[in-house]
């Protein structure tokens, strides 16, 4: 267990270090003077310019700059957005609420729907495969546009704009959760079909348990482990989907922040969001490791 | 039997899309840039199958002409990623332990980061445009191919026929080109086929966000982006380019999976 934990921590540190390095490389690969790249299209005083040079150690050799940058990120300093006139950490923090609300709801919907679908359809119906196929092929941004066009503009059931209240959350959540739901359903259904062949399923059936009971009480636990493993990867998918969906539904959030930073060439913010997501990925993976212990009792005794 | 029908349908769709990409003039007589203010935002009719956009341009014609740039982005990004990934994979498998560790750690890190964010980071650096979108997508898809090629090469390099080639005194490059690569090719092709669809969606998403081909280019994602303000009054602008993307990706996935089953 200790060994496992150490390996996990090592891998986490590696991902974070990689993300910092990728960001640093991006900063220095961008054509033009680094100071100009950092301030993007905003105009700053000579004092601020001197401050940036001092902060990033730009008057010193590249390895020193790299270490300076690494040290600042480790201390939680993601730099300054000169276009938003605030630290990147503050900018991300301000947009975090609406995004977490959207991502959390989408994840909840995706898990509930996919578990239900997988349990109900495994070895029972073939149409689910067609649904899965369409679900993975349809681009998220187009689903969002379709939902907006049909349910907001044509039918007027939901507001087209804004993050206020439950009604404004319904369509964005559906749009974001569709690709995740399909992937999870497909994976759990395929695994469930294998698990249902296992001898313990026959044993449970012979004890007089109903088919649904077997699926819920015995088989489901087995497919949760591989599904939970995907969680870290799902976070990446969520962040990506939110960029387009937030823009289409005019919602505040991390996606909008990122998109306007990309169009405005506000590199510190884009770098900050990449680093923030890397941290999120690492944290989620540690949670996933703990979830394994909850789901699979066999792992607990090994601990 | 039903699976067979799906595959046939997919082939027909892909053939039509390829035709549209190579010779759009054969499928439509219209001009993709032909604006006509008097015919703006007309619904689907016999004259304009898919309606007209805010500038009075025929949506069907623009979708046909959009097949080229849209498919090119997906194919281009995949091709670039396959080449770069293969080179990295070979380097890792044949270049000794230090290089192997280095390349594979790098691959792991890139695979851990969210794909779209990486693409956005690249585009912040390079600026928007078709070529930059292709580069951005290739950057984050290449590691997947590197991992596959490395795994394949690790197995192949221990095979008897490679040993034979070495003992015959063949050069390293020749062994890689003639003996290692052809044997790693099949799984690579299967993965790449399925991934063309994913790359196509990614490119269309980036175009939709305004980071790909700039207007008035008739690219599918860009068409949706340009029609954004008119979705409330003209549903056809929102629907048809998306149908084109989804149908293409669906067909690629169906064809790719069949290929996968045949190889496996």
Image (tube, coloured by chain):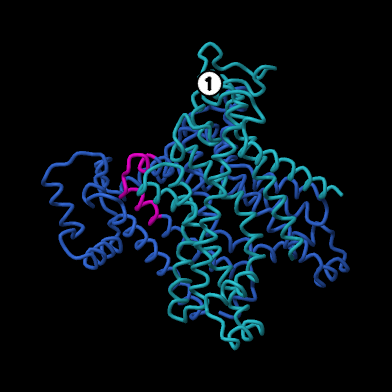
Chain colours: A blue, B cyan
The residue located at (77%, 65%) in the rendering is A194
Indicate the quadrant where residue A227 lies: bottom right
Indicate the quadrant where residue B62 lies: top right
Q: Is residue A142 above or below residue B108?
A: above
Q: Nearer the viewer, residue A258 or A114?
A: A258
Magenta stretch?
A260-276
Residue projecting furthest to the left? A47
The residue located at (63%, 18%) in the rendering is B43
For label 1, the crowd category at 10 Å Cα-Cα, with few meaning under 14, some 14 to 19 and many 20 or more, is few
Q: Position of residue B162 (x, y in %)?
A: 62, 82
Direction from residue B148 to residue B109 in the image, left or right: left
Which SS type dominates the magenta stretch? helix
Helix, strand or loop status at disc 1: loop
Q: Is residue A4 above or below residue A241?
A: below
Q: Which chain hosts label 1?
A: B
Q: Nearer the viewer, residue B60 or A214?
A: B60
Query: Is residue A49 within the magenta segment?
Result: no
Q: Which residue is mark 1?
A: B34
Q: Nearer the viewer, residue A298 or A134?
A: A134
Q: Position of residue B217 (x, y in %)?
A: 49, 32
Q: Position of residue A30 (x, y in %)?
A: 31, 52
Q: Position of residue B9 (x, y in %)?
A: 77, 42
Quarter of the figure with the C terminus of chain B: bottom right
Residue projecting furthest to the bottom? B167
Q: Is residue B259 above or below residue A160?
A: below
């Amino acid at each position: 267990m200790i060994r496992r934990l150490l390996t996990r921590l090592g891998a986490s540190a590696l991902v974070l270090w990689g993300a910092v390095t990728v960001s640093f490389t991006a900063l220095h690969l961008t054509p033009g003077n680094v100071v100009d790249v950092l301030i993007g299209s905003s105009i700053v005083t000579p004092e601020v310019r001197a401050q940036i040079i001092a902060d990033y150690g730009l008057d010193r050799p590249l390895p020193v700059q790299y270490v300076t940058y690494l040290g600042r990120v480790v201390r939680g300093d993601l730099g300054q957005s000169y276009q938003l006139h605030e630290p990147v950490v503050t900018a991300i923090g301000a947009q975090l609420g609406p995004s977490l609300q959207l991502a959390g709801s989408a994840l909840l919907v995706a898990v509930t729907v996919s578990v239900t679908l997988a349990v109900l359809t495994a070895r029972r119906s073939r149409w689910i495969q067609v649904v899965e196929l369409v679900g993975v092929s349809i681009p998220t941004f187009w689903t969002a546009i379709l939902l907006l066009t049909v349910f907001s503009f044509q039918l007027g059931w939901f507001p087209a704009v804004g993050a206020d209240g439950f009604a404004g959350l319904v369509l964005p959540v559906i749009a974001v959760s569709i690709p995740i739901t399909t992937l999870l359903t497909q994976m759990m259904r395929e695994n469930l079909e294998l698990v249902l062949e296992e001898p313990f399923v026959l044993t449970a059936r012979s004890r007089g348990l109903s088919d649904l009971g077997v699926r819920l009480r015995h088989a489901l636990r087995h497919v949760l482990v591989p599904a939970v493993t995907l969680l870290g990867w799902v976070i990446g998918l969520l962040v990506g989907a939110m960029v387009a969906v937030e823009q289409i539904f005019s919602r505040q959030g991390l996606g909008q922040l990122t998109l306007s930073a990309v169009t405005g060439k506000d590199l510190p913010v884009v770098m900050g969001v990449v680093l923030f997501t890397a941290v999120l990925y690492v944290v989620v993976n540690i949670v996933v490791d703990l979830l394994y212990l909850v789901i699979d009792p066999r792992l607990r005794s090994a601990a | 039997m039903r699976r067979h029908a799906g595959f046939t349908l997919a082939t027909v769709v892909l053939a039509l899309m390829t035709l549209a990409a190579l010779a759009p003039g054969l499928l439509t007589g219209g001009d993709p840039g032909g604006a006509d203010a008097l015919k703006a935002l007309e619904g689907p009719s016999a004259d304009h199958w898919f309606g007209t956009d805010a500038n009075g341009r025929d949506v069907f014609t623009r979708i046909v002409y959009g097949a080229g740039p849209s498919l090119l982005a997906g194919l281009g990004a995949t091709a670039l990623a396959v080449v770069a990934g293969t080179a990295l994979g070979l380097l890792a498998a044949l270049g000794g332990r230090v290089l192997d560790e280095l390349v594979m750690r790098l691959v792991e890190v890139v695979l851990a980061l969210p794909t779209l964010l990486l693409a956005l980071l690249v585009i912040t650096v390079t600026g928007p445009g078709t070529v930059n979108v292709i580069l951005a997508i290739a950057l984050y898809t290449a590691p997947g191919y590197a991992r596959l090629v490395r795994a394949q090469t690790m197995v192949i390099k221990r095979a008897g026929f490679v040993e034979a080639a070495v003992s015959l005194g063949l050069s390293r490059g020749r062994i890689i080109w003639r003996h290692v690569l052809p044997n790693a090719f099949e799984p690579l092709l299967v993965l790449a086929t399925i991934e063309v669809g994913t790359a196509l969606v990614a490119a269309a998403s980036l175009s939709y966000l305004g980071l790909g081909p700039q207007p008035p280019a008739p690219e599918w994602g860009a068409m949706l982006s340009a029609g954004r303000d008119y979705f409330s009054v003209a549903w056809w602008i929102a629907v048809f380019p998306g149908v084109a993307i989804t149908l293409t990706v669906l067909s690629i996935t169906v064809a790719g999976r069949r290929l996968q089953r045949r190889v496996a």
